Image (cartoon, grey):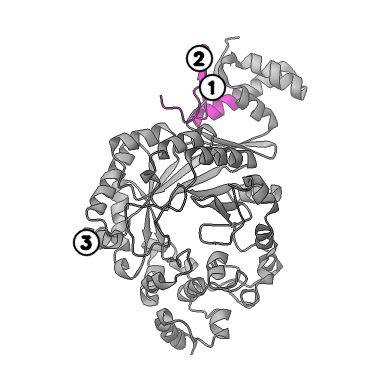
Amino acid sequence: MKEIYISRSPAVAARLLGDEMLILSAADSTLVSLNPVATCIWQAADGHTSLSEIVERYVCEEFEIEPQAAYQDALCFVEDLAQHAVLKVSDEPQAEARTPGEVP
Amino acid sequence: MRELNARALSLGVPLSAHLDLTYRCNERCEHCYLEHDDKGEMTTAEIRGLLGQMAEAGVFFLTLSGGEPLVRRDCFDIIRHARSLLFNVKLKTNAVLIREREAALLRALGVEQIQISVYSHRPEIHDAITKLPGSLERTLAAIGFLKSQGLKVTIANVLMRGNSQDSLAVQKLAAELGARYALDPTITPMMSGDRSVLRLRIAADDLQQVFRNPALVGDVEEFCAAPAAVDDSVLDGYPCSAGHTACYISPYGDVFPCVQFPLPCGNIRRQSFFDIWENSAALKEVRSIRARDLPTCSCCSHVGTCTRCPGLAYMEGNMRGPSTADCEKSFVRTGIATANMQARGLSYSAGLVQIQRSFSSAAL
């Protein structure tokens, strides 16, 4: 399995409302609401932890989900958010994720 | 968005906040409701602290405005800090101080939207309202810089007597610039209580033309339709989001339910934002009011569709009372008299004389 690395886009706005994470993409003004599992993945998307490790460490343990199924679900979720420029996907580990608001 | 607001309401979360960074301004708009002297603005550190508290309380949509927010030298530092806290930031500005560099910075900071006031496509009208010569030219240039950065720009077109004939031309100008267009016929009394600026409100006949123009309101038949029958769900509803899921903070740290609702709820120099949001007696009172508690409006056929502003009602003397400006809009829109008009025997303020005439012919 080829590893992928995900990082949060600095262009988004996000806030936890109850147990759901709200994310608004500045790119296309899409408002996304993440359930607790997806919120865990999004919060762990630091650019240098692989998706498989994130799933194993934060999803399988926390929510008691079987790893293979959890990874496939996570992959779909990541592709979806990448389309809205909420997450960035890379084949290689990225430098420390830029803080939103930090000027490049 | 409605679902989101309902969820925030059920959780008691202040989803939206409007923060004025300053009341100082480089324009002197004739209809402005503010006094522009600095009476002790919050420092950069105080605002950073406040933003942290607001993020913790759950504020997601943050509007930064003024006065003119960009007259503060630390404005970009504040926006940067707000974005680092993951707020969705909207900036309201006259854009006179925005050049290529500032536009690029706003883009880099991930500001969601910039709302800019344009009063007319004609410099002699716009500049006469702002009292700043050359302001239209500079504002339009700024919109060009912002659009070239791919930013979302909304042109806010406040309609009043002096520019009431220019709305279509401003709308066309917005389309040419790639900006959204928002029409606002509301002029509010000054926060000090001075109501003299209300003389600038658009005349009822002109407002009627606006409300009958599909280019400005969309489906005229739907927009001007008679109100639907009132049921319990309407009477149990809240007048608006002010104090429920939204609030306003002045440059001096005063918290109010809304920028148009100057009911003091606390000051962040004395209490935490969360403490005010949770425990303010004034906010609790605002939250306790349902449509059925409004003595005049609960009996009005417009109660479910009226844009009644509780803040404007408060400024008229009673937050449970009618907001005359909104009564006027409901009547001009539908031709059906409001309960407030009937209760007053049509003896309105001088500014509504034309409505009186229209009502007579419509009612008979």
Q: In this view, does B126 lie above or below B51?
A: below
Q: Where is residue B277 in the image (x, y as percent from the top left)?
A: 65, 50
Number of the label disc, if any, that sits on residue A94: 2
Q: Quick one: quadrant of the C terminus of chain A?
A: top left
Crowding at dot 1, Cα within 10 Å, few <14 / some 14-19 / many 20+, comes out as: many
Q: What element carries label 3?
A: helix
Seen from the viewer's position, the closer of residues B49 and B164 is: B49
Judged from this view, the residue extending furthest toward the front is B40
Q: Do the residues labelled 1 and 2 touch (CB within 8 Å)?
A: yes
Q: Does the magenta stretch include residue A98?
A: yes
Q: Which residue lies furthest to the bottom in this view?
A: B364
Badge 2 density bin: few <14, some 14–19, many ≥20, Cα 10 Å: some
- The one of A41 and A82 positioned closer to us in this rendering: A41
- Residue toward you, B273 or B104: B273
The residue where tag 1 is placed is A7
Q: What stretch is highlighted in magenta?
A: A77-104
Mark 3 is on which residue type?
Answer: Glu
The residue to which callout 3 is attached is B124
Element marked by disc 2: loop
Q: How far apart are marks 2 and 3 (CA)?
A: 54 Å
Which quadrant holds residue B290? Answer: bottom right
Q: Does the image show residue B116? A: yes
Residue B7 visible from this viewpoint: no
- The image quarter in which residue B356 lies: bottom left
Nearer the observer: mark 2 or 3; the answer is 3
Q: Which of marks 1 and 3 is in front?
A: 3
> Between disc 1 and disc 2, whose residue precedes?
1
B271 horizontally vs B210: left or right: right
